[in-house]
């Protein structure tokens, strides 16, 4: 059972406000009737002056009650007002002729309100107070005890308790229905907040539309991709059938799917997936199946290859071999080592490139990579520079980024040394672009890539080196795609090659949890 104060606040605030206005209007009406009725035939015929004082007092307390109810709710004041109002109306009824004066029905109004806002003992107490007031008015003030008056008073008292019972019965049922409705509304609101949070947290774009293709909801991802708002008309290039289809914005490609809502009067929603992420996931599935096959084949090749390598070493130790025979053995060993490098690269591919994309401090990562690369390539014949203005954060797997940079810088240094034009130079430049991406350029001062060979750069087993495997750039591309990044060869006016990586920028100013 709720306390009285809470019960009043939860169930009766609006009723009390309306009732305060009713009491004020009733009090003013009674005062006006008494002031305009000179003959006092309507109200206060037994004592006109006393009735006018009672009506004036009724106006004053009703004004105070109305002002109080607009500010706050206090159960003691409300109870006191109801008891005083019943007493005043009973007195006015007495001085206007008793139960036959027409006040009997008006006295039921505060009784009904009391039982509406506080069902229970208090409601029956108001009924008892009303019965006692009417009984005292009819018997004590009249000074007589007539059978007719006794029957009317008894019936009126019984009617008061019956009305209290019926109002409480109706109130309890209506309150139960309101509580159930409030519970369901609260549950719906929680589900709505949960659904909204889930939709806003999705990496995919969600757009809900009505039958007229007007946007009724879209999550932040869709709004950022296509600069749309609620109540906008859906762009024509997004309107189509329910089959998946590709679309593009100014910079990226997407896959859009339409889902009709059953019994939704033509409503539907669109799910928009980032094309690069879809391609990366498809590539992961393809590589997983390919990896299992290549891994088994590579292991089967490695075993006889090890036997051939050991046999050639044993044969090369023989003293009777001629120079031509030793040359053939060296050819066998060189090609065996090349096959072994190919097998190692294939086994690396078979392991997959599942990325752990976390916020990464690009500046500190490149600084660590530069130190590790210079330790691994200890020769002092080259120059390695980093060009970064400030701390930049991006989403990328740290180990994957280092592996990509190692392949690109190793290739760049080899081609720069092979060119022999100047001192070999390697540089990594990092900048921010307007599309919310981090741009990383890896440059060297070699001879660059021939225009006719650029379209095959990232194809597997494509190489211009006699001892190369042709898998280095292919692995770089796969690692970038696994991290939802792109890599391509960038044409430039200066000599040398430039490979450009575009990765997603980490925009949050909270660097907690960032990998350094």
Image (spheres, helix red, strand yellow):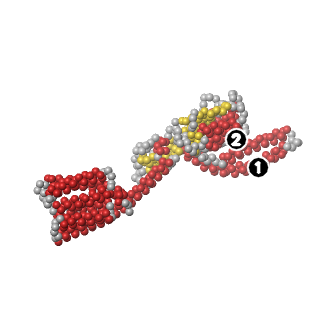
The residue positioned farthest toward the top in the image shown: 422
Q: In the rendered structure, which disc, 1 or 2, sits on the residue that comes first in sequence?
A: 1
Pinpoint residue 393: horizontal percent, then vertical percent: 56, 40
Label tally: 2
Tell me: residue 24, above or below residue 371: below
Pinpoint residue 203: horizontal percent, then vertical percent: 52, 47
- In terms of image quadrants, where is residue 514? top right
Write down the residue under mark 1: 304
Callout 2: few (<14), some (14-19), or many (20+) C-alpha neighbours within 10 Å?
many
Write down the residue under mark 2: 469
Residue at x-position 42% and y-position 53%: 189
In this view of the protein, which residue sits in the foreground, 142 or 424? Answer: 142
Horizontal side of 41 relative to 372 (left or right) equals: left
Residue at x-position 21% and y-position 63%: 104
Residue at x-position 80% and y-position 47%: 310
The residue positioned farthest toward the right in the image shown: 320
Callout 1: few (<14), some (14-19), or many (20+) C-alpha neighbours within 10 Å?
few
- In terms of image quadrants, where is residue 493? top right
Horizontal side of 274 relative to 142 (left or right) equals: right
Residue at x-position 42% and y-position 46%: 215
In this view of the protein, which residue sits in the foreground, 116 or 462? Answer: 116
Asked if one can make out residue 446 in the rendered structure from this viewpoint, the answer is: no
Quadrant of the image for the N terminus? bottom left
Tell me: residue 343, above or below residue 137: above
Pinpoint residue 71: horizontal percent, then vertical percent: 32, 50
Pinpoint residue 433: horizontal percent, then vertical percent: 54, 36
Horizontal side of 128 relative to 36 (left or right) equals: right
Tell me: residue 176, above or below residue 394: below
Tell me: residue 9, above or below residue 221: below
Q: CA distance from mark 1 to mark 2?
A: 20 Å
Quadrant of the image for the C terminus? top right
């Amino acid at each position: 059972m709720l306390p009285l104060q809470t019960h009043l606040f939860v169930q009766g605030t609006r009723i009390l406000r309306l009732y305060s206005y009713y009491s004020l209007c009733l009090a003013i009406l009674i005062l006006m009737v008494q002031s305009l009725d000179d003959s006092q035939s309507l109200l206060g015929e037994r004592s006109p002056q006393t009735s006018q004082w009672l009506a004036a007092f009724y106006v004053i307390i009703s004004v105070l009650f109305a002002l109080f109810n607009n500010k706050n709710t206090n159960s003691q004041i409300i109870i006191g007002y109801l008891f005083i109002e019943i007493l005043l109306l009973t007195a006015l009824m007495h001085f206007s002729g008793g139960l036959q004066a027409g006040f009997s029905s008006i006295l039921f109004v505060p009784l009904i309100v009391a039982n509406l806002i506080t069902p229970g003992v208090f409601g029956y107490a108001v009924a008892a107070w009303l019965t006692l007031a009417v009984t005292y008015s009819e018997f004590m003030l009249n000074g007589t005890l007539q059978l007719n008056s006794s029957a009317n008073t008894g019936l009126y008292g019984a009617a008061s308790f019956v009305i209290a019972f019926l109002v409480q019965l109706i109130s309890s049922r209506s309150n139960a229905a309101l509580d159930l409705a409030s519970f369901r509304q609260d549950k719906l609101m929680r589900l709505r907040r949960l659904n909204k949070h889930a939709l806003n947290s999705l990496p995919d774009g969600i757009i809900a539309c009505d039958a007229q293709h007007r946007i009724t909801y879209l999550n932040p991802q869709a709004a950022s991709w296509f600069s749309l708002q609620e109540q906008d008309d859906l762009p024509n290039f997004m309107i189509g059938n329910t089959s998946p289809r590709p679309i593009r914005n100014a910079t990226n490609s997407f896959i859009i799917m339409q889902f009709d809502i059953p019994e939704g009067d033509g409503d539907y929603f669109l799910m928009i997936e980032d094309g690069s992420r879809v391609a990366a996931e498809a590539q992961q599935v393809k590589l997983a199946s390919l990896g299992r096959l290549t891994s088994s084949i590579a292991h089967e090749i490695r075993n006889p290859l090890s036997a051939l390598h050991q046999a050639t070493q044993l044969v090369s130790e023989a003293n009777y071999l001629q120079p031509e025979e030793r040359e053939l053995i060296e050819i066998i060993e060189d090609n065996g080592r090349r096959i072994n490098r190919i097998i190692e690269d294939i086994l690396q591919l078979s392991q997959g490139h599942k990325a752990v994309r976390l916020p990464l401090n690009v500046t500190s990562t490149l600084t660590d990579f530069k130190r590790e690369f210079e330790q691994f390539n200890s020769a002092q014949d080259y120059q390695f520079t980093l060009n970064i203005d400030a701390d930049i954060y991006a989403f990328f797997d740290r180990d994957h980024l280092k592996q990509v940079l190692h392949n690109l810088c190793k290739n760049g240094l080899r081609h720069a040394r092979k060119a022999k034009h100047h001192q070999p130079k390697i540089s990594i430049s990092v900048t921010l672009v307007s599309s919310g991406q981090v741009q990383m350029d890896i440059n060297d001062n070699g001879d660059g890539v021939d225009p006719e060979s650029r379209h095959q750069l990232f194809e597997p087993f494509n190489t211009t080196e006699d001892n190369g495997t042709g898998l280095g750039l292919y692995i770089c591309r796969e690692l970038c795609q696994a991290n939802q990044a792109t890599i391509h060869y960038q044409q430039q006016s200066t000599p040398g090659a430039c490979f450009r990586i575009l990765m997603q920028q980490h925009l949050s100013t909270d660097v907690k949890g960032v990998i350094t």
